[in-house]
Image: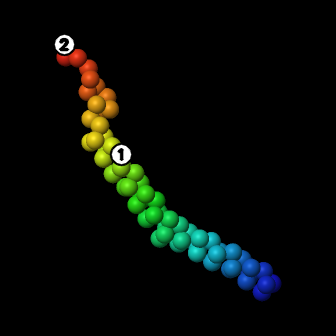
Amino acid sequence: MIENRNTILAVILSGLVLIAWQYFYNIPTMEKQRAAQQAELAQKQAANPAATPGANQPAG
């Protein structure tokens, strides 16, 4: 019975470690990557203003 309890406790604690790792390490890393991609996209759009939709539409 004690081995069963220890096994369940080990599984629960391992799950908590994985959840904490995801929350404190992976999410900030993903946010940094997303910000870098958005900055790169903004830089490309600023360098090529003709690529914006509706920029070349004739007036009238």
Indicate the quadrant containing the N terminus: top left, top right, bottom left or bottom right. bottom right
Question: Alpha-carbon distance for marks 1 and 2?
Answer: 31 Å
Under circle 1, the secondary element is helix
Under circle 2, the secondary element is loop
Query: Could you tell me the amino acid type at mark 2?
Result: Gly
Residue at 40 percent of width and 51 percent of height: 37
Q: Which residue is mark 2?
A: 60
Question: Is residue 45 or residue 20 the one in the foreground?
Answer: 45
Q: Position of residue 58 (x, y in %)?
A: 23, 17
Residue at 41 percent of width and 54 percent of height: 34
Residue at 38 percent of width and 55 percent of height: 36
Q: Is 14 rendered above or below residue 22?
A: below
Question: Is residue 48 or residue 59 the one in the foreground?
Answer: 48
Q: Which residue is mark 1?
A: 41
- Side (left or right) of 24 relative to 46: right
Q: Position of residue 35 (x, y in %)?
A: 37, 55
**Crowd rating for badge 2 (residues with CA inside 10 Å; few <14, some 14–19, many 20+):** few
Query: Could you tell me the amino acid type at mark 1?
Result: Leu
Q: Is 30 rendered above or below residue 12?
A: above
Indicate the quadrant containing the C terminus: top left, top right, bottom left or bottom right. top left
Tag 1–tag 2 contact (CB < 8 Å): no
Looking at the image, tell me whether mark 1 or mark 2 is earlier in sequence order.
1
Question: Is residue 20 or residue 39 the one in the foreground?
Answer: 39
**Crowd rating for badge 1 (residues with CA inside 10 Å; few <14, some 14–19, many 20+):** few
